Amino acid sequence: MARTRKQIAQINVVPMIDVMLVLLVIFMVTAPFINPGQVELPSVGKTSQPPAQPLEIVIKESGEYLLKNRAVAGDERVVAKSALAAEVAVLQRALPDQPVVIAADKNVRYEEVMNTMTVLQNAQITRIGLLARPAP
């Protein structure tokens, strides 16, 4: 009776370990010669101007528009929706970098906020944002 030999498949890892040890020695020898790059980090307090206070448009639940100029203390007035873009444009000519933020009452429809943003964008006012207050 002839016995059939069964082949055993094995992977010899000794040559791979030898290669890894050689690479490890090469990296350990060359690592001290590599100079790390210097990173120039910005420092605090190098800005030339403080950021401009925003121009705030408040949309009340009653549909009333209130315009608050945070750059001028106490400058707060009721504005008609039709005259809103013109009023903001006049104030933007005085301070062109002043951002405009829209703060709406939580019961105001979001469609009204989007319509206000569209009116402002059509009047070439570019820095428009939404003001959100954290929940108490």
Image: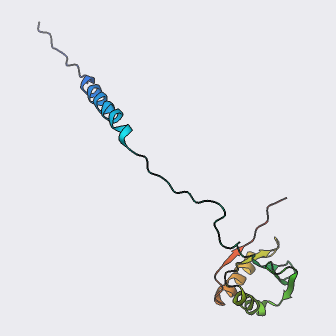
Q: Nearer the viewer, residue 130 or 23?
A: 23
Taking 16 as reference, is 53 left or right?
right
Quadrant of the drawing holding the N terminus: top left
Residue 68 position, x and y percent, is 82, 81
Query: In the rendered image, which quarter is residue 13 located in?
Result: top left
Q: Is residue 12 visible?
A: no
Query: In the rendered image, which quarter is residue 50 located in?
Result: bottom right
Is the residue 13 above or below the residue 129 in the image? Answer: above
Residue 117 position, x and y percent, is 69, 82
Q: Nearer the viewer, residue 25 or 48?
A: 48
Is the residue 19 above or below the residue 45 in the image? Answer: above
Is the residue 28 above or below the residue 106 in the image? Answer: above
Q: Is residue 83 visible?
A: yes
Q: What residue is rendered at 65% in x and 60% in y?
A: 44
Q: How is the image coloured?
A: rainbow
Residue 94 position, x and y percent, is 72, 88
Q: What residue is rendered at 79% in x and 65% in y?
A: 133
Q: What residue is rendered at 63% in x and 66% in y?
A: 46
Q: Going by the picture, which residue comes out furthest to the top?
A: 1
